[in-house]
Image: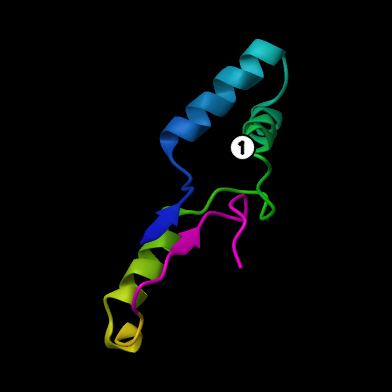
Amino acid sequence: MVSALVAFVGADALARRIAESRGVTAQEGMTILMQSLGGVPAGHFAPPADVAEVIGFLVSDAAASVYGTDITVDGGPVPTL
């Protein structure tokens, strides 16, 4: 299973609403949003292309022996080993 915290238009809109309601910049709104999720160590949500790259790997012959694993593409907020 691939789970992801992906950058998307809705996250940007939510960050802008947070910013407007608190009287801060859009970037500060995004920081507040990321902090509300427990923090994002990478400092940004995963771009859709990052998720696509992982999926491309998983459907390729290079991943022929990959079974029963979870892959999290999220910039770091979900603790994993």
The residue lying toward the viewer, choosing from 2 and 81, is 81
Tell me where residue 14 appears, x and y as whole percent: 52, 25
> In the image, is 65 to the left or to the right of 70?
left
Outermost residue, front side: 68
User: Which residue occupies 27% across, 87% down?
Assistant: 61
Tell me where residue 30 appears, x and y as whole percent: 63, 33
The residue lying toward the viewer, choosing from 77 and 47, is 77
Q: Identify the main secondary structure in magenta.
A: loop
Quadrant (top left, top right, bottom left, bottom right) of the C terminus: bottom right
Q: Is residue 79 magenta?
A: yes
Check disc 1: other Cα within 10 Å, few if <14, some if 14-19, many if 20+: few
Quadrant (top left, top right, bottom left, bottom right) of the N terminus: bottom left
The residue lying toward the viewer, choosing from 2 and 49, is 2
User: Which residue occupies 51% across, 53% down?
Assistant: 46
Tell me where residue 73 appears, x and y as whole percent: 49, 59
Quarter of the image for residue 53 reads: bottom left
User: Which residue occupies 67% across, 49% down?
Assistant: 43
Boundaries of the magenta span:
67-81
> In the image, is 52 to the left or to the right of 28?
left
Q: How is the image coloured?
A: rainbow
Tell me where residue 47 appears, x and y as whole percent: 48, 54
User: Which residue occupies 42% across, 55% down?
Assistant: 3
The residue labelled by disc 1 is 37
The residue lying toward the viewer, choosing from 17 and 1, is 1
Mark 1 belongs to which amino acid? Leu
Q: Which secondary structure, mark 1?
A: loop
Picture mark count? 1
Quarter of the image for residue 28 reads: top right
